[in-house]
Structure formats: C-alpha cells, structure tokens
Image (cartoon, grey):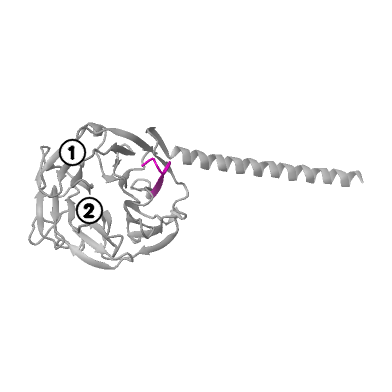
Amino acid sequence: MRRRNYCCLIAVAMALLLFIMFMCGAISSRTSVASRSHADFRVSGRALYKLDISWPRNPELFTGQVFAVAVNHLRGRVYVAQRGENIPKVLVFSTDGEFLQAWNTSTLEMPHGMFLANASADPSLWITDVGNGPFGHTVKQYSPTGKLLQVLGSPGKAGSSLSPLQFDQPAEIFIHSSGEIYIVDGDGGLNNRLIKLSPDLQVLWMHAERGSGLAQFYIPHSVAVDRYQRVWVADRGNKRIQVFNSVTGDWLGSWGSCFKDDAPYSVRFTPDQKYIVVAQLNTNQITLLEAPPIGIIGQCQVISTIELAEDVKPHLVDLDLKSSDLYVAEIGAGQAQKFVPLSAASV
C-alpha cells in the first residue's frame, strides 16, 4: 500500500514538473516572439505607423533578395519582386497576407523597381530589369498573372540611345493616370537620366547629365509624381531629392538637408499626399517627410522615422492607396513587411 502511494506521489510530481516546464517554455516562447516583434522597429518623431507582424501568413515563401513591392488597392493584391537563382521572381499576396500566386517567368532576370498601373480598369505591372543577360536593361509590362505584354528598351543591350530606346540598369518607373511614363535610368550604369515618355512612347522631355548641379543626377533611383504636377526623384548618389515640373520638365527645387547620414532610395506619397515616404537602405530607416502643398518646395522636414532592425536594408516601398498601408521591400532581411497606420486620421 505504501509502495503504491509512493509511486502515485512520484507520478504526480513528475506530471507537475512537466506542466511547469511546458508553461515556462510557452511563456519564454511568447516573450521571445514579443521581443522580436518589438525589436523589429523603433519610431522617433510622430508615430504614424505600426508593424503588422501577421503579414504575410507564409513569410517562408520569400526565398531571395526582395527588391520591390507594388500594391493594387482596388483588387487587394500585393506584388513582391525578388532576385535569386531558380526561384520565382514575383510573389503575389492578398493584402490580408494570403499567398495567391508565384510567377516563374523566364523573361525577368534581375527585377529592380516595380509599379502597378491602371488599377481601376486594366491593371498591369511594370518592372525594371537590370540584368546583363538577353532580357536585361529593359522595362517590362506584365499582366497581373505574369504574362509579358510589352518591353521598353533593347533587350540585352545597354545603351543611351533614344531611337531606338535603350537603358542601362533602369532603376524605377512611374505611370501617371494620364498614361504618361516617367523612368529613372540607371542604377549605376552608363546613364543618369530622368525621362518622360508620352503614352505612345515618344520622348517629351529628359534630364540626362551626370553631376551634382541643378537637374543633374548621380544614380537616380526612384520617381513619383504628385497631384500638383511635380516630379520627385530620389537622387541617390547625391543624397538628395530633386523636384521638377511634370509638364515642362523645369527644375523646381532640391532637398538634401534630411539626407546627410544616408541617401534616399525611394520616394512615394501617402494617399492624402500629406507625407513623402522615403527608404534609407544603409541606415535601415523609413522616413516620412512633410509634403509641401502647391507652390515653392521649401526645406524638407522629417515628421517620423521608423528605425528598422540592423541589416534589414529597406530598398523600395509602395502604399495601398485605399488603406494607406505601407509595404517595404527589404534586401538584407529577404522579405517584404507591412506597416499599418495607427489611426484613420494619421496619414
């Protein structure tokens, strides 16, 4: 009888010990996850965004270096471009984080920039390709399912010609609602150009001189157009943003005081056009600047800074024009992350 009671006592003690170990492990695991999520970013200045740690649901699907992201706000689609050998170059997710599709196209070598055009009617995805193979040095238009529709440039041939049109490592493209096309070319190649094309691909105006003077570029890396007929260019090599009249191409101003520590790699506007969102790769930051209204450009003013974890290397960004959600393509981390506004009135 005593032996039976002794065995029961040992069994109860072991069960209790296992339960305590399990609970400690669960608490430790939750603490570790919470610590990681809180360590992923830190905000200075006005807090406008928070990280959505649930997006996407299957982050293990990122298998390469993530260079660009584009959002179709009307259809709830997020396109992520990545580089690497024998991997899909584009992954498609829903804005809720569900994985939808992968593009295994052989026509895309090294994606760099990406833009979703004409979301309301006939959406298409434009991708700049900086590869050195037979499909590189081009800007390509794809259907939402990855069908190649059009190629700008001379595939496999780097150059500076306008007729025929040539690029050398084109960095990014922006398609205006009018159908007019803005291209920054290139990402460290022969050219340092901002080109505006008509919808039928005629050159309307261009700035193409390398240097640090007004309307000169050194590695123009990103381009966006605001509602006030202004073109904003991340002039990466010169650590500044330059601004031009979208109709005439006239130089309007330059911002450099906000970028003494690191260059701007991207330039995008929040849907209400109150803020300019800039990625700074080497300092692992996302910076939100106050966007000036119509009129003079003035001086840049930092409103908020999202400081990401070390070696995340944010490259290019895009915003959901319906929800204001911010998506960041991160080369170092090999992922895209989603940040959501803290309130509907924040951005």
Mark 1 vs mark 2, CA separation in Å? 22 Å
Magenta stretch in the rendered image: 336-347
Residue 280 in view here: no
Q: Is residue 324 visible?
A: yes
- Please state the horizontal and vertical placement of residue 160, each as a whole percent of the image: 9, 54
Callout 2 crowding tier (Cα within 10 Å): few <14, some 14–19, many ≥20: many
Left or right: where 130 falls relative to 310: left
Q: Is residue 176 left or right of residue 80?
A: left
Quadrant of the drawing holding the C terminus: top left
Pointer 2 residue? 174
Mark with earlier residue (1, 2): 2
Q: Residue 199, located in which quarter of the rendered image?
A: bottom left
Q: Residue at x 41, y 55 (%)?
A: 95
Q: Residue at x 55, y 39 (%)?
A: 31
Residue 208 in magenta stretch: no
Identify the amino acid type marked 1. Answer: Gly
- Residue 89's image quarter? bottom left
The amino acid on which the numbered mark 2 sits, given as a three-letter code, is: Phe
Determine contact: label 1, label 2, CB under 8 Å: no
Q: Point out residue 212 in the picture as x, y percentages from the top left corner.
A: 12, 37
Q: Nearer the viewer, residue 257 or 275?
A: 275
Answer whether residue 337 is magenta in the image. yes
Q: Give the foreground label among 1 and 2.
A: 1
Q: Residue at x 33, y 51 (%)?
A: 321
Q: Up-down: is 130 above or below 260?
A: below
Classify mark 1: residues with Cα within 10 Å, few (<14), some (14-19) or many (20+): few
Location of mark 1 (residue): 295
Q: From what the image shows, is residue 105 above or below residue 238?
A: below
| In the image, farthest residue toward the right | 1
**Residue 210, percent across and down?**
10, 43
Q: Which residue is rendered at x = 17% and y = 50% of the image?
A: 186
